[in-house]
Amino acid sequence: MEVKKGVIVSLGYGKYFLSDKIVGFVPIEEERGPARRTHVYIEGIAEPVVASKTEHTMLKDMTREGPGEFEAAMAVELIERIMTDLQHVGPMLRRSIREECGLDIDDIEKRIREVLTSDEPAIVQEGLFAEGEAH
């Protein structure tokens, strides 16, 4: 596995560093949460930076490159942020939202988790709408 030089790596919540300046990761064990997942050691900075992403996710970002990677990183950061925000929605409000408009927050969280933990590209699900249903 080779770290690509000059790749911008998102640590989450608007924190970005060059891949070749990141020298280490330490998973946060205590007080770990959606915005506190990993300590990232950066060349030239004495204290570690707290990242909202896992070390695995950031390492994947550091070892890939290509067109659209920045946009993909921004999309991943967005869905991570949505996931964090959805975790604050309580069970009564979730039930009310599901009954009122059919939006299943539990299912959305499950799908986001699958996307974020998958090493394979997401499969586009065909036939989301029943035949004859408006799109």
Image: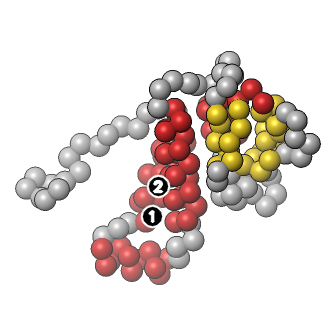
Residue 39: horizontal and vertical position, in percent?
Answer: 80, 46
**Vertical comparison of 80 with 5: above or below:** below
Tag 2: residue type? Lys
Residue at which label 1 appears: 106
Is residue 54 shown to the viewer in this render?
Answer: no
Quadrant location, the C terminus: bottom left
Residue 130: horizontal and vertical position, in percent?
Answer: 15, 55
Q: Nearer the viewer, residue 113 or 34?
A: 34
Image colouring: secondary structure
Instruction: State the residue lying farthest toward the right.
Output: 46
**Vertical comparison of 102 with 70: above or below:** below
Q: Quick check: 80 left or right of 7? A: left
Q: Which residue: 55% across, 65% down?
A: 85
Q: Which residue: 41% across, 38% down?
A: 122
**Vertical comparison of 6 with 114: above or below:** above
3D distance between C-alphas at marks 1 and 2: 6 Å
Q: Quick check: 25 left or right of 121? A: right
Q: Secondary structure at mark 2?
A: helix
Residue at which label 2 appears: 110
Residue 97: horizontal and vertical position, in percent?
Answer: 38, 76
| Contact flag, marks 1 and 2 (Cβ < 8 Å) | yes
